[in-house]
């Protein structure tokens, strides 16, 4: 028997287990998936938890519920990969040999990378919302907060779901309006980039949202430290932004397993061919989702499109055929804008998000890069799609793995 | 859109960043630097070469990463390219400024 091993049973790893179980000849192949966690979290739900829109039960399910029968689930922590010996070592000392390895170990926050971020104010007035613990602590803080300076901050790129911090600012505006205390809260969005929007079409279509919601922007802010005592963030040029509540997105990094294995770059992301998803170093290692260094968004939709293409490529690899250079960086994301509305964007490596209709050219029913209630319903429905279709590797009807150009206004 | 830099025609976007790296030359870099009131020294060139190399490897750029690169520390990076150093340095290097998806 040959052995294919998947590291990580998050969004990407679970989808691959489901795809491979259907596509591989199980008389020839054993499939194993390794993850130390007991729970599977719907990560997009972390955005809604601080505002009491979702509760913890909406976000958390058992990790085993989504791993198909016939796939061997190893509920242990990983020490490292020894690629030269085609072996994964577990922390408990077990060695697991593989013929093909799929790395799906994701990305996580690393607040310790910034001076003072994980200081005495961590989860007291300095919060993240990229972990369940952070989002929950923030919910509890906001429930009885009486107002002041709310600062939403990005430490450095790349981060998971690059739009989430902006969505957080939009939802905060909406949340405080509903609590009749919007006049008591200043919302400031602080970014290392040149603005809240960095692409021409998005800037044109969306800049008005910031004015309407009275969100002020501090751009080109390269954080040096969080000053816990005086409650301000300071950048390398000496700029300071005071806060009463700081909601930060810390530096994101790939899993430390990649560092221990010598497979990661300086942020622990695995160098990967952006079109085939094969590792650049080892031909029997493939990388999917946030764990890779490809210049696509770190988002569940990207992992979903990658999974369809990676499954085909693994079948090609097994047959000794050339891999398809097909992945185009396709991403498709709903963006909450508050007050029951949302945007939808669809883009890839070479095409920025533009206006248009989706998924049917000229018809819709969803409108791209425009606020609508329909898009918001799409975002909420997506949680059901995630649990019931996406993780199971079911193809989403009418949405192709590569980006479609029809129906879009590229001018 | 097209513009004239150092007596050659180059394609740039609305913010003056080159859209075709093949059109970049050291003379074009000098011209962009001039417009930003920066005079290029050998230290600037070392940083520019590093940034271009990272760009070719699809590697995302951040101030922190540049500070850890061993090429330049963050203090000197701000001295070489004042105010918003990443924006200025990428523009001179002929590569896109770091961007989000929207």
Image (cartoon, coloured by chain):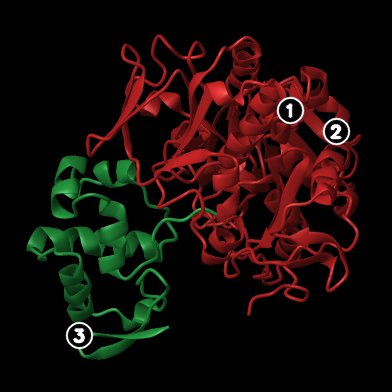
Chain colours: A red, B green
Tell me the crowding category of disc 3: few under 14, some 14 to 19, or many 20 or more residues within 10 angstroms, Cα based: some
Expressed as whole percent of the image width and height from the top left, the position of residue A136 reads: 65, 16
For disc 3, the chain is B
- Name the mark nearer the viewer: 3 or 1: 3
Image quadrant holding the N terminus of chain A, namely: top right
What residue appears at the point 54 percent right and 46 percent down from the top-left corner?
A: A211
Say above or below: A104 vs A22: above
For disc 1, the chain is A
Q: Which residue is mark 2?
A: A66
Residue A15 visible from this viewpoint: yes
Expressed as whole percent of the image width and height from the top left, the position of residue A62 reads: 82, 22
Q: Which residue is mark 1?
A: A41
Image quadrant holding the C terminus of chain A, namely: bottom right
Expressed as whole percent of the image width and height from the top left, the position of residue A347 reads: 65, 63
> Distance of mark 3 from mark 1, alpha carbons?
55 Å
Q: Which residue is mark 3?
A: B6
């Amino acid at each position: 028997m040959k052995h294919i091993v998947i590291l990580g049973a998050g969004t990407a790893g679970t989808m691959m287990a489901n795809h491979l179980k259907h596509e591989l000849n199980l008389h020839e192949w054993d499939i194993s998936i390794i993850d130390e966690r007991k729970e599977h979290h719907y990560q997009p739900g972390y955005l809604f938890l601080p505002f009491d829109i979702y509760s913890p039960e909406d976000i958390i399910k058992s990790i085993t519920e989504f791993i198909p029968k016939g796939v061997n689930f190893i509920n242990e922590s990983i020490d490292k990969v020894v690629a030269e010996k085609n072996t994964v070592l577990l922390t408990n000392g077990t060695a697991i040999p593989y013929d093909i390895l799929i790395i799906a170990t994701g990305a996580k926050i690393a607040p310790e990378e910034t001076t003072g971020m994980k200081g005495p104010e961590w989860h007291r007035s300095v919060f993240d919302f990229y972990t369940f613990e952070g989002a929950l602590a923030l919910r509890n803080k906001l429930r009885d907060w009486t107002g002041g300076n709310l600062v939403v901050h990005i430490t450095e790129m790349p981060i998971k779901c690059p739009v989430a911090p902006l969505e957080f600012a939009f939802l905060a505006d909406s949340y405080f309006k509903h609590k009749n205390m919007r006049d008591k809260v200043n919302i400031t969005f602080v970014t290392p980039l040149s603005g809240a929007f960095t692409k021409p079409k998005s800037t044109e279509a969306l800049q008005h949202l910031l004015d309407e919601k009275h969100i002020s922007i501090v751009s080109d802010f390269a954080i040096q430290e969080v000053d816990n005592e005086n409650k301000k963030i300071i950048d390398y040029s000496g700029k300071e932004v005071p806060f009463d509540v700081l909601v930060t997105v810390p530096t994101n990094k790939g899993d430390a397993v990649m560092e221990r294995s010598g497979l990661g770059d300086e942020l622990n992301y695995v160098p990967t061919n952006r079109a085939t998803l094969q590792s650049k170093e080892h031909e029997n290692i493939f990388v999917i989702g946030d764990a890779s260094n490809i210049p696509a968004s770190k988002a569940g939709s990207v992992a979903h499109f990658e999974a369809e293409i990676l499954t085909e490529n693994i079948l090609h690899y097994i047959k000794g055929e050339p891999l398809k250079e097909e992945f185009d960086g396709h991403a498709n994301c709903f963006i909450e804008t508050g007050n029951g509305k949302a945007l939808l964007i669809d883009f890839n490596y070479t095409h920025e998000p533009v206006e248009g209709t989706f998924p049917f050219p000229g018809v819709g029913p969803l409108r791209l890069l425009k606020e609508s209630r329909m898009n918001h319903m799409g975002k909420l429905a997506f949680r059901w799609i995630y649990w019931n279709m996406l993780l199971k590797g079911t193809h989403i009807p009418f949405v192709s793995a590569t980006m479609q150009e029809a129906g879009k206004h590229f001018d | 859109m097209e513009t004239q830099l150092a007596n050659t025609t180059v394609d740039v976007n609305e913010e003056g960043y080159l859209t075709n790296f093949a059109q970049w030359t050291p003379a074009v870099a000098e011209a962009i630097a001039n417009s930003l009131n920066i005079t290029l020294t050998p230290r600037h060139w070392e940083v520019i070469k590093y940034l271009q190399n990272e760009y070719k490897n699809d590697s995302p750029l951040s101030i922190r990463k540049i500070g850890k690169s061993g090429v330049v520390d963050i203090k000197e990076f701000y001295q070489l390219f004042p105010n918003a150093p990443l924006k200025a340095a990428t523009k001179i290097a002929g590569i896109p400024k770091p961007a989000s998806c929207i």
